[in-house]
Image (cartoon, rainbow, N blue to C red):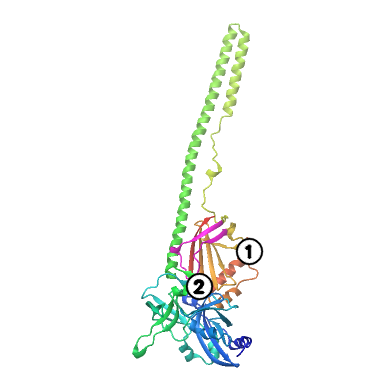
Amino acid sequence: MLSRFVLARFLPLMLAVLGLMPVAAGADDIAATARGVVRVVTIAMVDDQVAGFGHGSGFAVAPNRIVTNAHVVELAERYPDNVVIGVVPSEGSKSYQGRVIAYDAHRDLALIEVSEAKLPTVALFTGPVTEGDQVIALGYPGNVDLATAQSAADYIRPLSPVRSQGVASGRRALTGIEVLLHTASIARGNSGGPLLDPCGRVIGVNSALTRADDGDSTFGFAIADTELMAFLRAAKQPYTAVGMPCTSIEERLREDSAADARAIADAAAARREAANTAAIRREAALATARAQAERSRENVMAVAALLLVGGALGIGAAGLLESRGRRRPAIWTVSAGGAAIVAAVVVFLLRPSGEIALPPEMTTTPSASPPGKALGALICTLEPDHSRITISSTAEARLDWGADGCADRNVQFLEGEGGWQRILVPDDEQTVTVARFDPVTRRYTQTRYLLPAATMEAIRKLRQPATPHACTRDDAALQRLQSEQAQIRQQLPPLPNEKLVYSCRST
């Protein structure tokens, strides 16, 4: 028997690849799922000689975990010291050695672990699949390989999987296991590959096909989603599940563009209504203030008039007292009358001007949320009716919105029409996200592009070292960021794969 050490040295030589394969420029849903589809190769060795070679298909439910059929890796499960499992991704320049960590012969499912791989994962569809629904099979049919392979190396070269299309033909029981019957073309080698809905979500694992004798039609059998999820739960393997119906991204974008326009228009109308209400309140407050000021002015002038009349009467009375020889009372009376006249003059001169001043809150037009204002921590809830999801989580998102487009304290957004925007290019994911937030409507949108590895590599090279990786208001830094974002935008396909729309509220 050949030792595992010898096999471990032999496999990298067998899995040597000759170069990168070309990838499509566009990013459709099936191509996005194909990034996580792999060829599963088994190599049997006896006395340093290749005694057997087989292959099937598989798909990644985690960056380093592959689902395939149990019968694809049966020999490796039975003879682990003599059979090595190779995992060949659909793109890139590396292949990997794997090992079986979960095996269910009854369900015909197995789980392979590849410690070094970081593959794009697929999502399982948990919604209903009915007869007549369109389905797509992805995998590596052996008859295609036989027709096109030039040498054994072609079986271990990264290559995009073959896709075929058909319809779901109902559910059946095969050896006591629930399967999906379908008309998508599959062959030996498709075993373990995914059966997808039109949005690229996994609805089954291709396992077998009927024989086409005497002109009979060929049907495929896929291990049903219910069996697959039960197997993964038993293996304690987390997976992504999406239950939202498959919708057209074109239709969703049209609907959401109209919805965005309506939301902006509604926000503008709300601002106008608030301004009109504030203006009415201001005019009413002005009228009330003017009336109060006028009454105060009239009252003061009336007091001044009374003082003047009283003073005049006092002086007249003083003259009458003087004529009667009452000099001392006359002096007191004329003094009081003079004082009253002086007081009347002073009161008149100090009468209110009639000018009014409103409180500051009455002199400014209210704003729902000024574009540059900080809103603080927000919880954002997905709006399913406005979203299109193929693989992403539907859980709530959190956003910490600071002043001048500073998100989460270190991501600078750029101000534009309809809100603030930033294109996010992660290092550990084959996804570009165009994020947009409108502080007025508090709507947060993530438009996601699930891209091939070559496209992601090209986009990452566009990131400039001088581009700020923190929030800034420096004009030169913002111009560099804007230039970088424009270049990245040009590399994106015309249509995204997903659009996630959230409604945000303060925590």
Q: Residue pushed farthest top?
A: 325
Please report the bounds of the magenta region as a residue range.
377-400
Task: Answer with the quarter of the image where residue 430 lies.
Answer: bottom right
| In this rendering, the label closer to the viewer, 1 or 2 | 2
- Residue 378 belongs to magenta span: yes
Residue matched to label 2: 234
Mark 1 Cα-neighbour bin, 10 Å: few <14, some 14–19, many ≥20: few
Residue matched to label 1: 470
Q: Secondary structure at mark 1?
A: loop
Which residue shows up at 61% across the image and 90% down it?
A: 2
Measured Cα–Cα span from mark 1 to mark 2: 44 Å
Q: Position of residue 270 (x, y in %)?
A: 46, 52
Say how many tags the image has. 2
Foreground residue, 187 or 302?
Answer: 187
Foreground residue, 136 or 443?
Answer: 136
Which residue shows up at 46% across the image and 65% down it?
A: 387
- Residue 2 belongs to magenta span: no
Q: Position of residue 75 (x, y in %)?
A: 52, 86
Task: Answer with left or right where residue 503 lies relative to residue 14.
Answer: left
Can you say which quadrant of the picture contains the N terminus? bottom right
- Does residue 224 appear in this view? yes
Q: Position of residue 266 (x, y in %)?
A: 45, 56
Q: Position of residue 445 (x, y in %)?
A: 50, 63
